[in-house]
Image (cartoon, grey):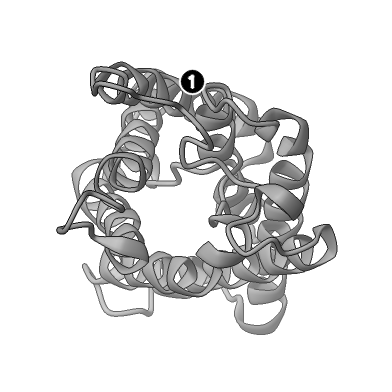
Amino acid sequence: MSIGKRVAAEFFGTFWLVFGGCGSAVLAAAFPSLGIGFTGVALAFGLTVLTMAYAVGHVSGGHFNPAVSVGLAAGGRFPFGELVPYVVAQVLGAIAAAAVLYFIASGKPGFEAGGFASNGYGELSPGHYPLQAALVCEIVMTFFFVFVIMGATHAAAPSGFAPIAIGLALTLIHLVSIPVTNTSVNPARSTGVALFASTAAVSQLWLFWLAPLVGGALGGFAWRALFGDARR
């Protein structure tokens, strides 16, 4: 596929991830009497990746996340020279999704943006976890997310099932880490909603770029070092 088609796929895939995942948190998580809660939000994020991986994964590889792109590059599965257009498309897709979500959410009487599904530590953490806990959590979670992706998409893995494993991995990650950071593992996702939050989320964005990128790179490198071979 041409680079134009691939970055378009990354834009729409990331849009869907942010709109579906963050949208579930903003619109449905605490809906009176019938809210879906943390479990529902975790499942929503997993479903966005699963569905878009099947829809456009064959076009772009289905990254939808700068940390995944960096991790796959570190693991030898993606050329470093194409990181910039992929990351730009992912961030733009996330911002566009957050803008549409904000437009919909703001139609509710008495709407206040508040955290707007943004990520944070300290006072902005759902469980008030400190910076060091948030940093370690995001690095470890992104490490294993990319580690799973590397293994599930290997040529020797069962064909056609990778999106299921990857979607379930993201669901599990959210089930564990929502109380800590509201779960990022994705700098684009963090950036999109932070721009519309009425908190200090933008001032904490540095951590949700640094930690996922480090974790992703380590995950890709570790999988390649331990298990990599020519069949990929």
What secondary structure is marked by label 1?
helix
Amino acid carrying mark 1 in the image: Leu
Does 196 appear above or below 189?
above
Indicate left or right for 54 with 135 as reference.
Answer: left
Question: x%, y% of residue 28?
Answer: 24, 47
Question: x%, y% of residue 91?
Answer: 53, 27
Indicate left or right for 213 with 39 as reference.
Answer: right
User: According to the image, label 1 marks what residue?
Assistant: 92
Q: Quadrant of residue 228?
A: bottom right
Q: Is residue 165 visible?
A: yes
Indicate left or right for 55 with 106 as reference.
Answer: left
For image coordinates 69% across by 29% down, the residue present is: 202
Q: Is residue 154 visible?
A: no
Front residue of this view, candidates 173 and 79: 173
Residue projecting furthest to the bottom: 226
For image coordinates 51% across by 43% down, the residue present is: 65
Question: x%, y% of residue 159?
Answer: 24, 72
Question: x%, y% of residue 71?
Answer: 63, 55
Residue projecting furthest to the front: 110
Count of number-bearing discs: 1
